[in-house]
Structure formats: C-alpha cells, structure tokens
Image: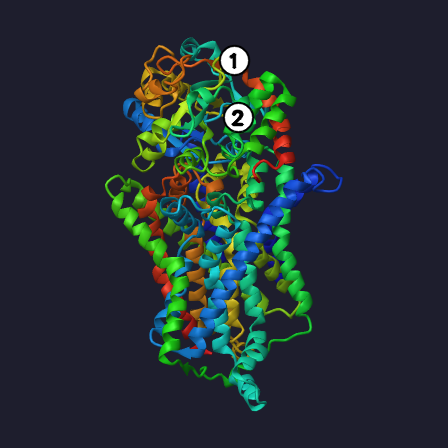
Amino acid sequence: MSKRIITGVLILVQIVLILSCSTPPKEVRVITDRTESHLTPLMEYYTKKTGTKINAVFVEKGLLPRLEARPQEADIVITSTINLLETARSKDLLQAFTSSRLKQKLPASFRDPENYYFTTSYRARAIYYSKDRVKAEELSTYEDLTSPKWKGRVCIRSGYHEYNLCLFSQMAATMGFEKTRSFVEGLHANLALPPKDNDRAQVRAIYEGKCDVAIVNSYYMGIMLSTEDQRDWGLSAKVFFPNQNDGGTYILQSGAALTKATENKKEAEKFLEFLVDDYAQQYMGNTLYEYPINDKLPLSDVNKSLGDEQKEVVDGKFKIHFVPLKEIEKYRPEIIKVLDEINFDNK
Amino acid sequence: MKKTVYGFIILLIFLLPVLYIVYEALSSSFSLPFLNIPCSILVSLLSNTLLVSIIGIFFAFITGLGCAVAVVYYEFPGRSFFEAALCLPLAFPPYIVAAVYKEMTHQYYQFGAGIENIWGAGLIFGFTLYPYFYLLLKTTFQNQSVIYIETGKSLGLHYRQRLFKIIFPMAKPAMFLGLLLVIMEIISDYGTVQILGVRTITAGIYDTWFSMFNQHLAAQLSLVAYVIPLLFLFIWTLFSRNASFYNPPNRWTPVKKNTLAAGQAILSVCLLSIPLLAGFIIPFSILVSWAIEKLKITNTAFLFSNLFNTVILAFIVTLASIIISMFLHYLKRNSRPHSFIHAVCWIICAQYAVPGIVIGIALLFLTSAFYTFPGTRWLVSSIFLIVFACIIRYLCFSFFSIESGMKRISSRLDELTRILRKKSIYRIMHIHLPLLKPSIMIGCIFTFIIVAKELTMSLVLQPFHYSSLSLRIFSYTRIGMIKNSALFAIVLVLLSIYPVFSLSRWFNVQESIS
C-alpha cells in the first residue's frame, strides 16, 4: 500500500519536473507598482500586435523587496517612481539594455548614463489651488508654502509616500539638506489635515473646503476630469507649476528597466522599445495625462490648459528642474529621518 | 516518540515566519533592539494601535454581550431571526465597510470631522468584529448549567445579581477569547487603517519595509505587533491560573427565556437592529445602489475569474486546515496533558497573532531559494504560497472549533474501540468524525469566510496574472473608486452570507449532540 503511494508521488514529481523544465519562456514577465487599469490596455495592445504575451503582477507596495526576494521572477520592472530603479541597480538587480533603438530614441536627460534604466513618461509634482479661494498670483514656489499666510491651508499625502520622498530628496539635492529640513518642518506646521490618503483625496479636500492648496501630481487633473465621480473635485481646483522663475518644477518620472536575471532579454527589450514608441507615448499622454519623453509629441488638451494662469507657462509647457537620479536617492535616508523626527504623518 | 517527531516537524513549519522575523530583527546589531526607532514614532504607532484596539474592543464587547444576553435569556418577536442575522457582519471585510462609510461621510457630511480618525476606525472595527464576542458568549450562555443559576436563585440572588455574580464571571474564558481574536484582527489589519488614514503598527511595518527598505527595523516592529496579543494571553493565564470554569455537562437543559413585555420587546428589537444596520444592512444597501449606478461601466470580465480564485483559495485552505487540525487533535488526544504536543498546538494557534503582512514578507524571502530551481518554481509562483500563509495564520479557527467538539467526546468511547482492538483510523472515521460533524462544519465556515476576505497576505504573495475579489476591491478603493468595485464587494459578501447564516444552526446542532 505505502509502496504504491510512494511510487505515485514519485511519478507525480517527475511529471511536474518535466513540465516545468520543458516550457521555455514565451512571454515577457513584468513586475510593476503602476495601477493595473492604466497599464493593462497598453499591454493588451502589444500582445495583439506582436503575439508576445505580457504577463504582469501588480504590486501596490513592496516592489523592491519582492524583486530582491525573487530576482528571477520578472524580465522587466516598470515603476511609477524611477528612483526605485536606482536603488534596484545598487542592489545588483538590473542589467543595462543594449538595444540601439532605445538608446537612439531616448534623450540623455531621460536615461541612466550607463543605460540601466530610462524614463517612460513623467509628471509634475505640482501645486493645486482652490479656484475660489486662491489666486494664482499668491503662489510662487514650493518653499513659499511654508510662509505664515498658508498656515492651516495646505494638504499633502503621507510624507513617506514615494512621491513625497522623491520631491523632498530632489529638493535636498538642489538646495541642500538643511534648507530642505526647514521646508519639511514649515510645510508640516502649515498643514490643514494630517497627511493621509492618496493624491486625489487632497484635491477632494480642496473641493470640500478643508484646505486651499495641495501638493499633488499634475496628471490627476486629467484623470479626475474624465472620471464621473471626481469631476467636481477637479473643477474646483487649478494646477500651478511652482518655481518657474527659480530653477523649475520638480518632476516624478516613471521608469522601466531590464532585470539582471531575465532569461528573455530579446523579447523584453522589444517591449521596452515599444514603451518609447509614439503609440505608447501618446497613450501615456492622452489617456494617463502624463508627459511623453518625446517633446515633439502633442500634449493632451487637459495638459495644455494646465498652468494657464501663469504667464511663464505657454500651452502647458513648463520649466522642468532636472535632478540627476543618483543624487535623488542619496538623500532618502536623511529625509526619512527628518520625517520621523517631526512625526510628519501625525499632525 | 513518533508523535514528538511529527509535532516537532509541524511546529517548525508553522514557526518559520516568526523565526525569520526574529532572525531579521536581531541580525541588524547586537545592541538593544528598538534603539534605532525614533521614540516618538514608536510611541505614536503604539498608542494609535492601542487606542484603536481599545475603542474597537469596547464597542465590539458591549454590542456582542448585549446581543448575546438578549437572544439567549429573553423571548421577543423576531428573536430567532436576530439570533442568526446578528452574525451577518462577519461576512463583511472591515476595509469595505470603512471605505463605504468614508465615501458616505464625504458625500453627505463633508464639512464635519468624518470617520477618518482613531474613533472612526475603532467604531468600524466594533461593528464588524462584534460577532466574535456575540457567537462565543451566546454559545457559553446557552451551555451554562442551570445548576449554577438555580443555586443562585435558592441563595436569594436577584436577577441582576445572578447576571453579574454567576453568569458573566462564568463566561470569562469566552470573553477573553473574543478579546484576543478582536485584538489580533485589529493589530494585523492593513486595509481598514490605510483607508481611514490611521497609522497603526502595521502601517509602520509597511513604511519601514517598503519605503525605507529597512527590513531589520520592520522586523523589530513586527515582533512588537506579535508580542502585544501574546502579552494579553500571558496576563490571562497568570490571572486564571487558579480559577476553573468547570461546567457540568450531564445536566444540560435549555435556558428558560423570559418573555418581554410589549414596550421592552420593541426597545430590544430597536437596539438589536443598530449593530445589524450599521454592520451589515446599511453598507450592503449602499453597495447595491452603487453597483446599480455603475453597472454599465463596471468591468465584469474579471468577475468570474476573481470569484473562482477566491473560492478555490478559501476551499483549499479550509480543507487543508481541517485535515491538519484533525491530525493535531489525533496526536493531542493520544498524549498526556501538559505534554510537548499540547505546547505545539498552543504555539501553532498563537500564529494568528502574527500580522498577515509579516507572514507574507517572511514567506517571500524564505522561499526565494525555491525560485531559482525550475523544478520547484511552480510551487512559489502559484497560489500555493498564499494557501500556505493562510493555513499558518488561520489554523486556530478550525483547531478551536474541533477542540470544542473533541472535549465533548468521552474518552470512554476511545477506550471502547481499544478494547475491541480496532485501529485508530477506525476510531477517527467511525466515532470521532460523526460526532465532530457540527464542530468541523463550524470550523469550515469560519475558515472559509475569513480566507475569502483575506487581503494583506494576498497583496504581498500574489502570483503573476492573479487577482481575487478582495485584491480587485482594494485596488479600486486605493484610487478612490470604490463605487466601481461595488459589484465585486457584493459578490464577496454574498459568498459568505449563506455560511454565516448557517453558523448559528450548526452551533445549535452541536448542543443537541452533546
């Protein structure tokens, strides 16, 4: 009896082993922290066009620890904050891409000098202000949000969220750590509500009159205006690109990279090439309301109208403050320490 | 000897996540742990966690106790309906209730404080978790021997004195078990507190691990989260060391119910409706109205595959948990009290205190070696890992359910089979299983509904191209579009409604058998 069971189990194990060894990867595996509904249409289009299946896992948080635990799990990493890719590279999880088409298509400012990762699209970390209660002339820079006139009027999501860590780190790389510390402290002092929820909820708070200005990503305006339930929130606010006379507005970049352990580099690179093609770039511009890396492509109508009360912004084109990605990641630990010290999320 | 080996192997498997966390927590430095957590952060995380827990437990306890007393000791119109229906909030994952109420307060009460604070979180937990207290207390009250109450009567105790001097003190173990379950649910919760913006210790673990990439600090925080419920357990054992809660089983008679006068009956129906409305009917009807509103734009393509994944996961975990629990009980029944096996069972059940996120991350790293070999890769790139994680965390539900049944089976029956020289498998199949049927059913139902609602571990361990109802709902909720996932939420709740309704029935069957 028991012999029969053992034989059965052994045969089963054999079958599984043969099955798992004999299937070569025919698909491109993507691990991403981007929103599922945003990325899926693009992947489906690619599969329809080329026949290559894109298999994805959408990890809301913890993209990096997951990649660290299972470096072989994916061929491509796509992230909404490219600085994660710098950390991934420092942990030896990525490999440089070799595709000449990619190199040719990508402007130098949107690609790692050693070709480990590149920007797929970007958005501004902008200031949203209430249409009724704030005039565009009252706003100028990020730093100005710490002045007494904004006391109890500012909203922002959790300081530990990637978007904010990335903004604060870029500031530290630009104006030094001490000045950034006083900015974070000043911002915290001026908050109307404890930092929580997502970016859209901050605009909703403007709509509900709980705050007058909020630091929110630019593309949420387009998304809110095209979402029935959130239209009113978007209509209650306008977007301001800060620091236009002073270095420029900080941007957050979405990025992509090849994993070091990929067994399918050729197919994976083809998909990466697709991401910078006009079709994908226009999709990110027109459907996700981000900015394409190819500045010759037209902006979406919503994005064209952003910042229309600022004379420095023409047709939605604003001055960008580029910070080298290696510089951004350098300040992450120090920024987190500051957030801890002032207990940023507990107002 | 064989038993010890089996016990040791099972123990090791169940302890893997905790051992990993201890290793990570200690491997950063051999100085005192927690030195590198800023004190203010630790204090605010802990105080938030404790406050939410206290408020949640308070509301859950008051509601659960009130409902149980009303249903067991009084007779009024609609009593049997309430007896079953009051369990219904169990079918609702707290994070969905939180998201529904948050959206509602924004729509109709947007200028007030809303529920996005500690009080709101506590209330939501109170209304969704009170069925734990309710079910445990209801069963205890129903089982309480009349001897005690009659003795009280003959000693001239008033009704209220009997309640506070006999009935409630005798129900202490049930109250404590309820408290443990609720506190463990609250501490390990991620969805609800994230939606309501309350930073409890789980949020701290998430941030330190996923934003600061500091796994040592996160592991230290995880240990704190693990230790809090264990501390309660320790205090309880300390205080109840010399107490015994013996209940003579052979003179069990149904509790005599007092019929309420019309006014009192109306009042109790009104009061009992509050938790039912707040914890089930209101959120459910709001979801239905949203689902109808958004029916045209709801993406139903995934509905069936998500439902299928949820059911399969819950089914496999339930089946496996029952089998493992039965095996553990088999080992336990054949060993002396206070033996190694008893300790093993106790430790395995305490794994419910490990927050889901911690089990998830620990398994992710522990199984990374499997991923390098193609032969074992299927194991960790399928739902197997989620199944494994769920079994580790939720085994206590099936274990305790079966235990309550096992206790009622006289050891004389076991001896009888031995005298008849029957194999132990015969004893299990022909004597234990039939007698245990109601207990097993209760265990199955609990495990099934809890796994169907599971979110945190699936978030961390989800394989490629996988989604379940709870994952889908959460992905919509986090971008502020809960209305678009209302249909998915309704399906998830409907999936658990029948099992929840039948819980009461099986509890009653269990009574009649004993």
Q: Quadrant of residue A323?
A: top right
Looking at the image, which residue sits at the far bottom? B154
The secondary structure type at the circle numbered 2 is: helix
Q: Is residue B506 above or below residue B210?
A: below
Label 1: few (<14), some or many (≥20) within 10 Å?
A: few
Name the one closer to the observer, B303 or A347.
A347
Q: Position of residue A334 (x, y in %)?
A: 64, 27
Q: Position of residue A314 (x, y in %)?
A: 37, 12
Q: Amino acid at mark 2?
A: Leu
Chain bearing tag 1 is A
Residue matched to label 2: A145
Instruction: Answer whether residue A26 is visible to the viewer in this image.
Output: no
Q: CA distance from mark 2 to mark 1?
A: 15 Å
Q: Position of residue B461 (x, y in %)?
A: 48, 41
Q: Position of residue B135 (x, y in %)?
A: 46, 67
Numbered circles on residues, count = 2
Looking at the image, which residue sits at the far top? A104
Q: How is the image coloured?
A: rainbow
Q: Quadrant of residue A277?
A: top left
Name the one closer to the observer, B370 or B209.
B209
